[in-house]
Image: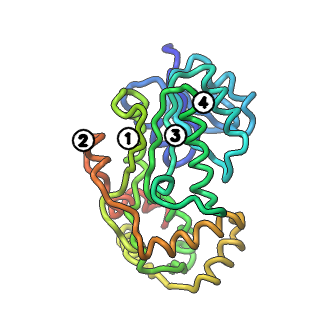
Amino acid sequence: MTQPRILVTGATGNVGGAVVAQLHAAGIPVRALVRGEAHFPEGVRAVRGDLGDPASLEEALEGVDSVFLVWPFLSAEGASDVIDAIGKRARRVVYLSSEGVGSKSEEPGEAITMFHTELERLIEASGLEWTALRPTGFASNTLGWADEVRATGVVRAPFAGLARPLIHEADMAAVAVEALTTDALLGTRPVITGLELVTQKRQVALISAAIGRPVRFEEVSLDEAVEQMKAAGYPAELVEAVVPAQAEMLANPEPVNDEVERITGTPPRSFRQWAVDHAADFR
């Protein structure tokens, strides 16, 4: 059997899982980093390891040329050791960063932007070949509404008019595969976006259409939204970063561009398509 040459971290998540699936479908040897039991198609090797424990990555990195890196923590603590471990085995890393790194000021408390910024710096200084993908908001983040859609048919959140070009995980994966398997994106930081700006109220309407039953958006105050997130177990530093960032986006929306099509040759999928693809999650 051919030795896998690409390691995918975050392989059981939405984006990492899509990268694994697309590499495998293309016949490219791929290895999936997992912390527990996980099932993949025949031919995909799952290897135990934890990015929180760099010493645990040795087997996963053996014989690997390139790594797709999804950082699962809210700070860059420990990232230097992980990148060092990657650098001892691999020659290339493709990092899933954020559009916010290039567009927002690095204010204290900008938890998401700050750790992505530091990861990009560490990778660029490592001597590895690199690409930093900077997507806009993930369409899959709306899966956070799934429980209340199933239970009540109502999404309660702030900012009904907040419009974002949410990007399908399959489009992020397609760009990542290009970066992992060709030299076209070496040393670049492409901002990749969804097809168009879609308000949160419209997102809920599209989910409703996809599942074939009524779902409505009920706007709540910022204070209530903060309390909801904290009650749901989100870390305080994440809540303090996300809610103000959403408020800022009302006036200054994320960009919409054609980078996905330029890189992959195919236009990005719409949020309508994402909702259809994930209808089962909301039923």
Label 2, on which residue?
A: 265
Please name which of the two marks, 2 or 4, marks the residue nearer to the observer: 2
Looking at numbered disc 2 in the image, what kind of residue is underneath it? Gly
Q: Position of residue 81 (x, y in %)?
A: 70, 32
Image quadrant of residue 190?
top left
Mark 2 secondary-structure assignment: loop
In-front residue for pair 22/277: 22
Label 1, on which residue?
A: 175
Mark 1 secondary-structure assignment: helix
Q: Which mark is residue 185?
A: none
Residue drawn 68% across and 78% down?
A: 227
Q: Is residue 230 left or right of residue 136?
A: right
State how far apart marks 4 and 3 are (Cα): 20 Å
Residue drawn 30% across and 59% down?
A: 195
Please name which of the two marks, 4 or 3, marks the residue nearer to the observer: 3
Q: Is residue 173 above or below residue 6?
A: below
Please name which of the two marks, 4 or 1, marks the residue nearer to the observer: 1
Q: Sequence-wise, which precedes: disc 1 or disc 3?
A: 3
Q: Is residue 109 left or right of residue 97?
A: right
Q: Label 4: how many residues lie within 10 Å, few (<14), some (14-19) or many (20+)?
A: many
Mark 4 secondary-structure assignment: strand
Q: Which mark is residue 95?
A: 3
